[in-house]
Structures are given as C-alpha cells and as structure tokens.
Amino acid sequence: MNRFRPMTLVILSLVAALSLSSCALDAPTKPTRLLVPAGATALYWNYPMPLPTGVHYGTMKISKPSVIARVRAMINTIPVSNYPKNQACPADAMVPYIVRFSTTSAAASFTKVVFQLAGCPEATVFQHGVAQRPTLGGWSLPTLYTAIQKVISPRGQPLA
C-alpha cells in the first residue's frame, strides 16, 4: 500500500495546480448587476423600422410567462464582453434593439437591455435606468440575439 502513497500525493498536487491555473482564474464571473432579475410579467421588444422618413421603432408587448422566462434566461447566459483593450471596432452605424422587463404593463421597466449588433457587438444592461458596466457580448452576440428574437417573435420582425 505504501507504493501508492507517492502516486496519490502527485495526483492531488496536479489537481490543486490545475484548479489554480491561469485558465481557471481567467474565467470572468458575471456580476449580479448584469443579470435580469426574476419578477417580470411584461416584456417589451423595441425594434427599428427603417422608413423613407427615417427610422421609427415598433414595440411588441409580451405577457406570456414562458416566453418572458426563456428570454430572461437567454440574456442571463450572455457572457461579459471580452474584446481586447487594443481592439479597433468598426463604427456602430446600426440602430439598437431593446428588450425591457417590467412587473406590470403599467409599471416602468426595471431592466432594459440594449443590443448594438454592429461594430463590436455588445449589450448594455440598464437596471432602474442606470447603465451597468461592463457590457455583455462578444462576436457571437448577433447569433444569440437572433435566437432571442425568434423566442419573442417566431415569425420574425413585424413590418411597418
């Protein structure tokens, strides 16, 4: 039995070293202020409608609890933006999409998420009207947003 003791110590040392490695420590934890809290009974989706007279916004109200919960869960899985500090982003020339959550249809939104999908795609979370930092996103955000949009409106964006 004594011959296995050194091997056990080596394995335990490797496990400890790997758990403290740079890969494990580099994984950012998402601050709770960037999460959409539970409690919403109304979700509003604002989407741009380019018209000859300019860009106007359409608004779709969702009150189905399963859709609200699914959209909330999807937004809460978006990682913190991880663009390098020296990353040059193309100009953001796109009108943003907005998803708002509120407790009732008459109440003000307690959380708003603004999706900017051009340039370096990012989503800014607003809690009670205050922008939270850091932003959410990354290069996969347009794909994630498309999935969120399909949950909200399976037939796509309504036309003007």
Image (tube, helix red, strand yellow):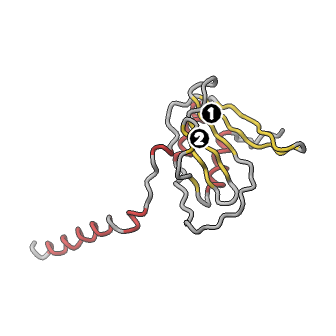
- Answer with left or right where residue 142 lies relative to residue 159: left
- Answer with left or right where residue 35 lies relative to residue 99: left
- Residue placed at 57% from the left, 44% from the top? 131
Task: Decide: is 3 above or below 118.
Answer: below
Q: Residue 43: which numbered mark, if any?
A: 1
How far across and how far down the image is residue 14, in percent? Answer: 27, 71
For mark 2, does the 10 Å Cα neighbourhood hold few (<14), some (14 to 19), or many (20 or more) residues? many
Question: In the rendered structure, are the residues bearing label 1 and label 2 in contact, judged by CB atoms less than 8 Å apart?
Answer: yes
How far across and how far down the image is residue 82, in percent? Answer: 54, 61
For mark 1, does the 10 Å Cα neighbourhood hold few (<14), some (14 to 19), or many (20 or more) residues? many
Residue placed most toward the observer, 64 or 141: 141
- Answer with left or right where residue 36 lies relative to residue 100: left
Q: Secondary structure at mark 1?
A: strand
- Residue placed at 55% from the left, 35% from the top? 128
Alpha carbon distance from label 1 to label 2: 9 Å
How far across and how far down the image is residue 87, in percent? Answer: 60, 67
Q: Earlier in the sequence, mark 1 or mark 2?
A: 1
Task: Decide: is 50 above or below 62.
Answer: below
Tell me the residue that label 2 is attached to. Answer: 71
- Camera-side mark, 1 or 2: 1
Q: Quadrant of the C terminus?
A: top right
